[in-house]
Image (spheres, rainbow, N blue to C red):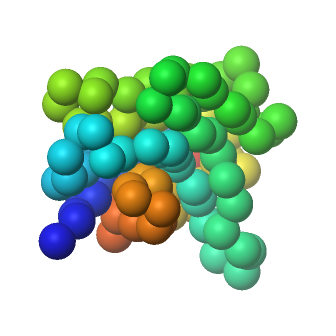
Amino acid sequence: QVQLVESGGGFVQTGESLRLSCVVSASVSSIRLMGWYRQAPGNQRELVATISSAGTTHYTDSVKGRFTISRDNTKKTVSLQMNSLKAEDTAVYYCNAEIRGLGYWGQGTQVTVSA
């Protein structure tokens, strides 16, 4: 059974940083695209950033230059370094991994940024 376990959420002030991490319980060779999504109250879940198995990254415009996604295939982890956080970054952040053609989600971790 594939599991994704996130950690690193919390409460910070505007301008501060947080680092989210997600560990995937699946064989390394089967993990393709990995990414982070977020969902704020009353909003749909939206893509934040993705990273391919080759390391190609993609970011939504609102986080470009502030967030950095990375992955460690040896440790089967994907991380999201979030700098210069803004109040509008407040949301539940979800880890996602594409494994053998299927998408899997973590349970989510809350990020709250106080203005």
Residue under the image location 58 percent in, 39 percent down: 50
Q: Does residue 81 lie above or below 91 as drawn?
A: above
Residue 63 as seen in the image, left or right of residue 38? right
Q: Does residue 61 lie above or below 34 as drawn?
A: above
Instruction: In this rendered view, identify the residue nearer to me: 69 or 54.
Output: 54
Residue under the image location 50 percent in, 44 percent down: 33
Instruction: In this rendered view, identify the residue nearer to me: 108 or 77.
Output: 77
The percent position of residue 43, horizontal first and vertical second, equals 73, 74
Q: Does residue 70 lie above or below 114 as drawn?
A: above
Residue 75 as seen in the image, left or right of residue 106? left
Residue under the image location 69 percent in, 60 percent down: 46
* Image-quadrant location for residue 79: top left
Res 17 seen here: no
The image quadrant where one finds the N terminus is: bottom left
The percent position of residue 47, horizontal first and vertical second, equals 67, 53
* Image-quadrant location for residue 32: top left
Residue 68 as seen in the image, left or right of residue 64? left
The percent position of residue 112, horizontal first and vertical second, equals 51, 54
